Image (spheres, rainbow, N blue to C red):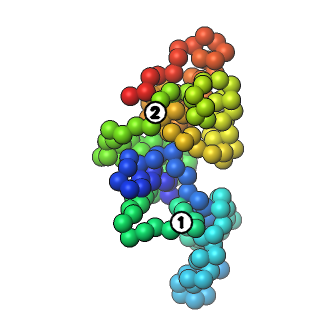
Amino acid sequence: MALLGIATGGACPDIAAQPFGALTDANSVYVYPTGNLVPSELETLMQQSGYAVNGTTQDQFSLLTFYSGTTVSASDTIDIYTALAVTRGTAPLALPAVIDQAQAWLGDRFPCTQTCCVLRGDVNSDTKVIVSDLTFLVNFLFKAGAAPTCFEHGDVNGDTKVIVSDLTYLVNFLFKAGAAPVPCP
């Protein structure tokens, strides 16, 4: 299961959003003894932040928690866009490409005219493109760090994704006289 984006109050989907928590666990522990998930156990599982994967059990369930401790009033809306991404056989390396296709599909169906973008490459939103932006991007991409407050600031090369190629682009710009980050839309 991949989180493609979250939109609140009718805004554009934030495709850099991360779920609060995600886990997989054994059906034999949580489902089969009672015939279904027990609501109190489910609520406890939903309070766990981060990611937990049970890699030893074949018959398991998956749970994603998008927000925790959030109050939604009757006039608020939260749209959560997810995709079940699957590959056949032994092609797990193709999974990121499948998720990229799903994000592109979402972008085609919900084109946004709103933008928060002021300066691509200013990943930490301090109004400068400097080494601290590289650190921020490395932490986001590889260490489960905070997402950029403006997704487009992290999309340094303008390809609608925040991935390793953006990090490479930023390194080249800062240290190798490479091209400047692509201008904001």
Question: At 63% across and 41% down in the image, what residue appears?
Answer: 140
Tag 2: residue type?
Cys
Left or right: residue 77 compared with residue 59: left
Residue 166, quarter of picture: top right
Which residue occupies 60% across, 61% down?
21
Residue located 66% across and 29% down the image:
134
Q: Secondary structure at mark 2?
A: loop
Q: Image quarter for residue 65?
A: bottom right
Q: Is residue 121 above or below residue 46?
A: above
Dot 2 crowding, Cα within 10 Å, few <14, some 14–19, many 20+: some
Q: Position of residue 22 (x, y in %)?
A: 59, 62
Query: Residue 62, percent across and down?
Result: 55, 66
**How far across and how far down the image is residue 154, in percent?**
54, 34
Badge 1: residue crowd in 10 Å (few <14, some 14–19, many ≥20):
few
Measured from the top left, where is residue 178 in percent x and y? 57, 13
Q: Is residue 113 left or right of residue 153?
A: left
Q: Going from the N terminus, do you reach mark 1 or mark 2 first? A: 1
- Residue 159 seen: yes
Q: Write the residue at 68% across / 29% down.
A: 132
Q: Are marks 1 and 2 in contact (CB under 8 Å)?
A: no
Task: Find the residue positioned furthest to the top.
Answer: 177
Q: Is residue 163 left or right of residue 175?
A: left
Q: Mark 1: which secondary structure?
A: loop
The residues tagged by marks 1 and 2 sit, at their Cα atoms, a distance apart of 26 Å
Where is mark 1, residue-wise? 70
Residue 99 higher or lower than 117, as above or below: below
Residue 27 visible to the viewer: no
* Residue bearing mark 2: 117
Q: Looking at the picture, does residue 179 appear above or below residue 150? A: above
* Amino acid type for the residue under numbered disc 1: Thr
In the displayed structure, would residue 139 be above or below residue 60?
above
Q: Residue furthest bottom?
A: 34
